[in-house]
Structures are given as structure tokens and as C-alpha cells.
Amino acid sequence: IIFNISETQILLGDLNQDTSIDILDVIITVNIILEVISPNGYENIASDLNTDDIINIQDVILLINLILDR
């Protein structure tokens, strides 16, 4: 039996996977909250910055703080 395992690195806050946390990631998070888009598996994990299994305004605030702290 052979199992192929692939591990994806997840950078919390980097929803568009461009290795940079910026306003585009905030926009994607807000669109997920407003249900404009449905998150894929990666976006679901990367957008939950406080790891409470809920994507909400608290995650947006944490994301903005990450951007401003740079």
C-alpha cells in the first residue's frame, strides 16, 4: 500500500496565497463574511486568524492589525 501525502503550508491571513498579507486579503475575508464568495479549504483556514472556527469581523480586525504592524 502506498500513500501519497502532500502538506500545504498555510500562512494565516494570506488568502490569495501571494506570500504577502495586504488589503487584497482583507477584501477576500470581507467577501467571505458577506457570503459574496464561498471559501475553499485553504481560505477557510487562512482567514480564521483567531482560530475560533468562525470567520467574522474579529478576523478582519486581526488581519488589519497584521498589516499595520509592518
Image: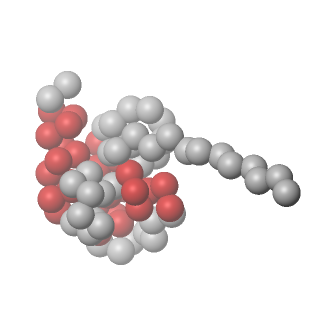
Image spot of residue 24 (x, y percent): 35, 45
- Note whether 30 is above or below 49 in the view shown: below
For the point 22% across and 46% down, which residue is it? 63
70 on left or right of 34: left
- Residue 3: % across, % down: 76, 53
Given the current orientation, which residue lies at the most extreme front position? 1
Q: Is residue 52 left or right of residue 16?
A: left
- Asked if residue 24 shows in the view, the reply is no
Residue 57 in picture, x, y percent from top left: 17, 62
Question: Residue 9 at what x, y percent from top left?
Answer: 50, 40
Residue in the picture at 45% in, 65% down:
39
Where residue 67 sits, quadrant-wise, is top left
Q: Nearer the viewer, residue 26 or 9?
A: 9
Residue sitting nearer the eye, 41 or 29: 41
Q: How many marks?
A: 0
Q: Quadrant of residue 68?
A: top left
Front-lying residue, 49 or 34: 49
Relative vertical location of residue 4 with respect to residue 70 in this rendering, above or below: below
Q: Quadrant of the C terminus?
A: top left
**Residue at the (26%, 57%) spot, across then down:** 51
Residue at the extreme bottom of the image, as rendered: 35
**Quadrant of the rendering where the N terminus is positioned:** bottom right
Identify the residue shown where x is 34% and y is 44%: 12
- Residue 18: in sight, yes or no? yes
In the displayed orientation, state which residue is furthest to the right.
1
Q: Is residue 65 above or below residue 61?
A: above
Render colour scheme: secondary structure
Indicate the quadrant where residue 47 lies: bottom left
